[in-house]
Amino acid sequence: MNRTQSVPAIDLERLAGKWYVIAHTPARMERLACGAVVSLAPRDDASLQISYRFTLGTPDGPRKLVRARGHALDRTSLAEWRLQPFWPFAWPVKWPCEIKYVDPDYQSAVVAHPKWKHVWILTRTPIVPEQAYLDLVGLAQSLGCDPSRLRRVPQMLGAPLPPAAGQPG
């Protein structure tokens, strides 16, 4: 796979669920994110319902929730997406996003802007061994990410997170 390609094909059902953001090149709103979690839920129209939850700075920091809808550009590969945020209404802009890597067991993934402006390294567990983290950073680098721009996202076990979309709290 070259540095500009996304993965050949994605299984949406296996991609669905909770992913922990263990590193990213943060957008302005997430520069101090802690306990960042992305939840993906496939919809009947082949789009994705996305909830991105985190706190700012500390577990007691302000809670943030960003909801978006993901629209696949290619419904065969399902690797290239346009994300339309809802905050508190649907934005007319759709942000490009590509799944650059997902491991065969769907336990880790690298998601990025097509030109690597923003990157998210995701895992199914909030804490990963140091060597596994370094391996994922190395993988992201081999795919085109500048590792000096990555910020490791603190995952605080037991820290309360904002509720997912549609849940009370």
Image (spheres, rainbow, N blue to C red):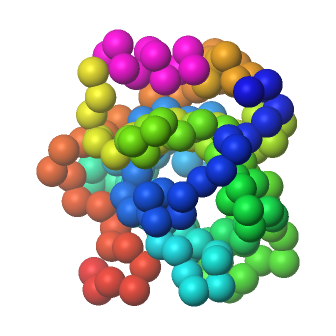
Magenta stretch contains residue 98: no
Is 154 positioned to the left or the right of 108 in the image?
A: left
Q: Is residue 12 above or below residue 6?
A: below
Q: Quadrant of the C terminus?
A: bottom left
Kindly identify the residue that appears in the image at 65 percent across and 50 percent down. Answer: 9
Q: Quadrant of the N terminus?
A: top right
Q: Is residue 157 above or below residue 63?
A: above
Q: Residue 91, position in %: x, y?
A: 77, 77
The rendered magenta stretch, by its main secondary structure, is classed as helix
- Which residue occupies the foreground of this view, 32 or 94? 94
Kindly identify the residue that appears in the image at 32 percent across and 16 percent down. Answer: 130
Q: Residue 38, position in %: x, y?
A: 46, 57
Q: Is residue 134 visible?
A: yes
Q: Residue 143, position in %: x, y?
A: 70, 24
Magenta stretch contains residue 135: yes
Is 117 positioned to the left or the right of 27 in the image?
A: right
Q: Residue 51, position in %: x, y?
A: 49, 68
Q: Is residue 155 above or below residue 144?
A: below
